[in-house]
Amino acid sequence: MRIELVIPALSLALVSACAEIPDASNDLSDDMLTRAERLEQLLSILASDSMQGRKTGTPGSTKAALFLANELERYGLDPAGDNGFFQNVPLARIQVDGPNGPRERLMLPSASLDFDELPVENIIENEVNVVALIPGSDPSVSNEAVVIGAHYDHVGIGPPIEGDSIYNGADDDGSGTVAILEIARDLVRNEQPRRTVVILLSTAEEMGLLGTHWYIENPVFPLEQTVADFQIEMIGRPDSLAGGFGRGWLTGFERTTMGEQLVNRGSPIVPDPRPDQNFFFRSDNIAFARIGIPAHTLSSYNLHDDYHRPSDEVQYVDFDHMAAIVEAAVEAVRILANGPKPNWVEGGMEGLTGNTP
């Protein structure tokens, strides 16, 4: 068994390696672009080949984190991490020899592993969640928070398919990540929400929701005062089972009052049309749900064939559809941040005991 401790500090060497960090600013003001154009601009950067598939523990992941932090700073958000917008996420990379050869996995230091008995071979300084705060405007509820988030990591470089080995992750979950950027921009530039909003762009979801688990153990806002978690994942293409263009579905819709609250206010959101896929248990929302916080993921994933393939590219994203979903998501976040707290319904926490996958 071999172990590396991955301790994120975004060292100068790594920053130098990613010296040309792009941003979405250009000669035109953001305000002169449509929402769809802004989303396309952001995603064309985040899911570009230069990000090398954003796999956790690679320079591409670091470059993506720097890009996201740069955008949040440009929008005027308050940083909420250990180091500006970066929340350090220490990970242990363990290589175990098995009958089919060595295999590697990443674990949090808090996992059931005696680190003192394992040799540390290397230090890599590049793993972070990107976190920011929008303070609430109403003193009576500003001590409560809504977390909104997406995971910015993907699966990196893999076996080539039709000559392409970079798994760009435009839909998974580049689409959700840039949606959160756009929502944050909207919240800052328009009426400030009554409750505090925490922006959590998490790492290592593809490795087992590790970035979100770390946030749960090290929250930037008290969990007991966190009233909801609203994740966005894979909204780049319409889903006919959800109603097609501009409509999304909410995982675990029937478990809390959140979905009903949003629909009653006009949100174009329906229950997950494929409950057999267990999507409620497969995204970052489940880490919050397991500790009792009403938590769901908004998606329009239609089970397309490009999932975890190099063909998950920007060119296949429907940005008009995505902009319509983001418009609905902005309003959904405002409903959660300004209105009644969502609650679990009777039986809603069924199946939530035990460890998150």
Image (cartoon, helix red, strand yellow):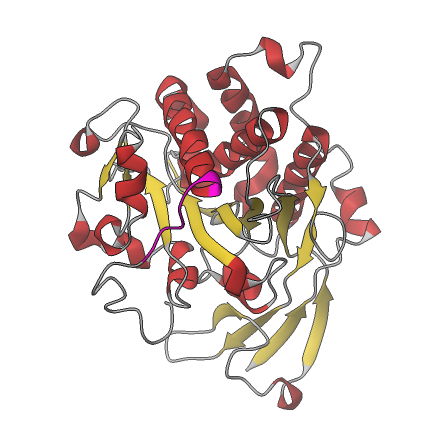
Left or right placement of residue 82 versus residue 214 in this view: right
Decide if residue 300 is in sight here: no
Magenta stretch, residue numbers: 337-343
Q: Position of residue 22 (x, y in %)?
A: 69, 29
Q: Residue furthest front?
A: 140
Depth check, front residue: 264 or 20: 264
Classify residue 332 as left or right of residue 211: left
The quadrant of the image that shows the C terminus is bottom left
Q: Is residue 316 left or right of residue 239?
A: right
Question: Which image quadrant for residue 248?
Answer: top left
- Check residue 336 for magenta coloring: no
On the rendered structure, is 146 left or right of 260?
right
Residue at the limit of the structure toward the right, as seen here: 12
Task: Name which residue lies at 64% across and 45% down.
Answer: 133
Query: Dividing the picture into quarters, in which one does residue 246 lie?
Result: top left
* Residue 112 x, y percent position in the rendering: 50, 83
Q: Residue at x 76, y 54 (%)?
A: 83
Which quarter of the image is occupied by the N terminus? bottom right
* Predominant SS of the magenta segment: loop
Q: Nearer the viewer, residue 224 or 82?
A: 224
Identify the residue at image location x=44%, y=51%. 229
Q: Position of residue 280 (x, y in %)?
A: 29, 54
Question: Is residue 157 depicted above or below 123 in this figure?
Answer: above
Query: Does residue 175 appear in this view?
Result: yes
